[in-house]
Amino acid sequence: MEDRAAIPVSLPRDNPTQSYWQLDVDEIADLRSTESLPSETGTVIIGSGITGAAVAFGLASKGVRDIVMIEARQACSGATGRNGGHTKAASYLTFLHHQHEHGTEMAAKIARLELANIRAVHAFAREHGIDCESNPCSTTDVVYDAKQWALAQKGVKALQAAMPGEDASVYTFHGPEEVRERFYCGRGGDEGVCGALTYEAGSINAYKFTIGVLKLCLEKGLNLQTSTPVTGVAKLLGGGYQVDTPRGSIRAKRVVVATNGYTARLLKKFQGIIVPLRGHVTAQRPGLNMPRGGLSSTYTFFYNNGYDYMIPRPKECKFGGDIIIGGRLTSATSEGLNEYGTTDDTAEDEDTMRALHDTLPRYFGDSWGDDDPEGRIRKQWTGIMGYGPDGLPFVGEMPGEKDLWASASFQGHGMVLCWMCARALVEMIEGRDGEALRGWFPDVFRISEPRFGLTFKGRMHTRGDPSAS
């Protein structure tokens, strides 16, 4: 893993695999608000995914003007526009680790933030009329491995003991027979179901959501510059920064880096700390035996060395009823080792995709039936996530670099972390970094010098019970 983490992070690649979410590219995808780059501005935001969009909206809503957003490729063409469509925390999976490392109070604060993030995203879409298939709903975790089943029960028990009566601790367990009858899994195909648990989550078209946020920002005066890779950020002697691109340079009073898995390309201190990880996702037509009205829940399927995540598309949308499923990292060579450190979303791992193609009939068994006459696979693609050494985001001002800010390292869970992290970052930028912010934002998410001394060892949330080590 050390060798993979040391691979120099590149800029986003040209001509990435086409994401299912971008089959209908939005009108602002290639927007350049002005023909040339302004020579100077107040704020430069690098990256146009959900983090960059949320920061831009937060600042603009506070009256900040002169914001330039720079994107290497099309608008929202990175991880946000290439994900699996989930707004799902599964806080019980990480609670034991957070409790072991940071104490019960901090672990509970993280769980609260994750649920608050889910709710805030769907509420924003509703309040601003963003057409993005926002679907707050229940989710179902189906577990096929006895050790993971025992660990899930232990995690939920610890979470509920720490947060009695709180919404973030509400989980319901289901036995194997109920899983077969109610959730269509375990009869035919893989029948080794241990059980399931359900809790609050949701699904969303993150590409449409973020494009919607960007359009609100454009109405507030945002200058968006797409197809403009940033090649360097340099501190100026008199204060501020010079942001270099192939189209020229911009001087800015402050810079916000919102590039997640690509962050180390611009902020070298993150090399080996925020490590890219390539994920694989497919869009599949449902089998002919699947419920006519579609599935009412999203899913995650846990097996002995990994998991797959899945959402059904709403019936009323284009390709309604399609099932989005991603994961299968451990199906790749050396259990996915070579997926770490790569930023190549122009390609895919054939073994991973082959395994993803076969997942749904295995999980749904008799409930799947024959494939759709047009074929099972509608689309497949890859995307680049960003993982950190302690399983937590990095949010705040760079140590010793006044007015150089970052929010990154979302561990493949950006849709339950990015929005609230961006909200916190705006508060910090605006000088409101006091007790009110510390009351809800976890201090362990903040960028700090000691965290740069940590060693990256892979995905934190798949390591099991920390008390057993």
Image (spheres, rainbow, N blue to C red):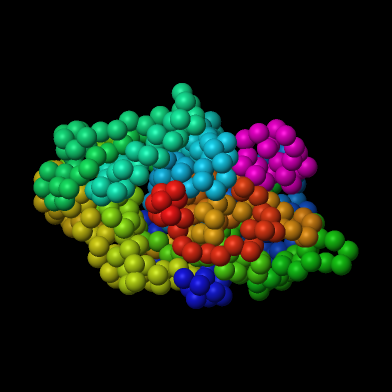
Relative image position of residue 62 (x, y in whole percent)? 72, 38
Quarter of the C terminus within the rendering: bottom left
**Is residue 313 or residue 454 the one in the foreground?**
454
Q: Seen in the image, is 229 located left or right of residue 143?
A: right
Q: What residue sits 45% from the left and 30% below the top?
A: 161
**Is residue 127 or residue 438 the one in the foreground?**
438
Q: What residue sits 11% from the left and 51% below the top?
A: 370
Q: Seen in the image, is 67 located left or right of residue 27?
A: right
Rendering quarter of residue 213: top right
Q: Is residue 436 magenta?
A: yes
Relative image position of residue 212 (x, y in whole percent)? 53, 44
Seen from this angle, which residue lies furthest top? 165
**Magenta part of the protein: which range?**
423-443
Seen from this angle, which residue lies furthest right? 238
Relative image position of residue 218 (x, y in whole percent)? 63, 47
Q: Is residue 344 visible?
A: yes
**Is residue 215 or residue 153 the one in the foreground?**
153
Prevailing secondary structure of the magenta residues: helix
Q: What residue sits 48% from the left and 59% below the top?
A: 385
Q: What residue sits 56% from the left and 41% below the top?
A: 103
Rendering quarter of residue 82: bottom left
Relative image position of residue 34 (x, y in whole percent)? 68, 59
Q: Is residue 208 visible?
A: no
Q: Is residue 279 magenta?
A: no
Question: What is the total number of numbered labels drawn onto the structure image?
Answer: 0
Q: Seen in the image, is 130 located left or right of residue 355?
A: right
